[in-house]
Image: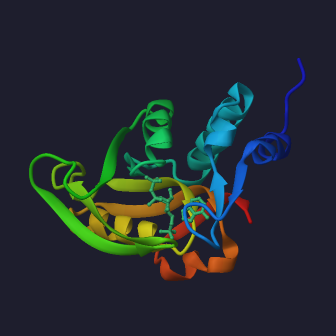
Amino acid sequence: MSQISAEDKLDYVKSKIGEYPNFPKEGILFRDIFGALTDPKACVYLRDLLVQYIRQSQPEVEVIVGLDSRGFLFNLLLATELGVGCAPIRKKGKLAGEVVSVEYQLEYGSDTFELQRTAIQPGQKVVIVDDLLATGGSLLAASELVRKVGGVVLESLVVMELVGLDGRKKLDCKVHSLIKY
Ligand SMILES: O=P(O)(O)OC[C@H]1O[C@H](OP(=O)(O)OP(=O)(O)O)[C@H](O)[C@@H]1O
Ligand SMILES: Nc1ncnc2[nH]cnc12
């Protein structure tokens, strides 16, 4: 049986990602992960690439944190593959119980993220996942929240990175992206 290489899997996933000029605002080129997720082969390849990356980069991870909403496509999937727990960071007002909050800016607006205080135990090792890194506002806010509840951010992992926006400069943790634009 022939084994497809990681490089070929990545090329295939990349070929399926959608591109929409002027969405959701004039001047934004929207990179659409859903273009890849409607393709069954791209789903499997994307899963393989993300799981393989975390296994070699952060074998000690204990919690996968996904960002509202496209990060949720990956956090449960990765947590079950890796045998760890997962937690959501959600936009304001959606999480029950005691939460910590932080306001942040993103490429096309501003918002507030929240995390349940009990979602991560003090000292637990966390990898944050999302579909895309643009200005870095979302990932910066997410790492702030994880630390507020006592978690240790090992790394942030995204499918796509818009390198021209320099988002990774804002972040004070290791960042990895599969696809760079
Ligand atoms: O690096 P940044 O400039 O912060 O931008 C990246 C964020 O923007 C998008 O989410 P969005 O807030 O549009 O929410 P959605 O996933 O619910 O569409 C994307 O899924 C990232 O979370
Ligand atoms: N250009 C972009 N495409 C898709 N999601 C985004 N989130 C922030 N900027 C984005």
Q: Residue furthest top?
A: 1
Residue at 51% over, 47% down: 59
Instruction: Give the image location of residue 38, x and y in percent.
Output: 65, 31
Residue at 85% over, 32% down: 4
Residue 149 image-quadrant placement: bottom left
- Vertical relation: 101 (above or below) 59: below
Q: Is residue 94 left or right of residue 88?
A: left
Residue at 15% over, 57% down: 99
**Numbered circles on residues, count:** 0
Q: Residue furthest right?
A: 2
Q: Is residue 136 left or right of residue 112?
A: right
- Identify the image's colour scheme: rainbow, by chain, secondary structure or one colour: rainbow
Residue at 45% over, 30% down: 80
Quadrant containing the N terminus is: top right
Instruction: Give the image location of residue 96, x and y in percent.
Output: 13, 46
* Camera-side residue of 68 and 142: 68
Q: Is residue 141 left or right of residue 177?
A: left
Q: Is residue 89 left or right of residue 116?
A: right
Instruction: Give the image location of residue 49, x and y in percent.
Output: 67, 42
- Vertical relation: 135 (above or below) 156: below
Instruction: Give the image location of residue 181, x and y in percent.
Output: 74, 66
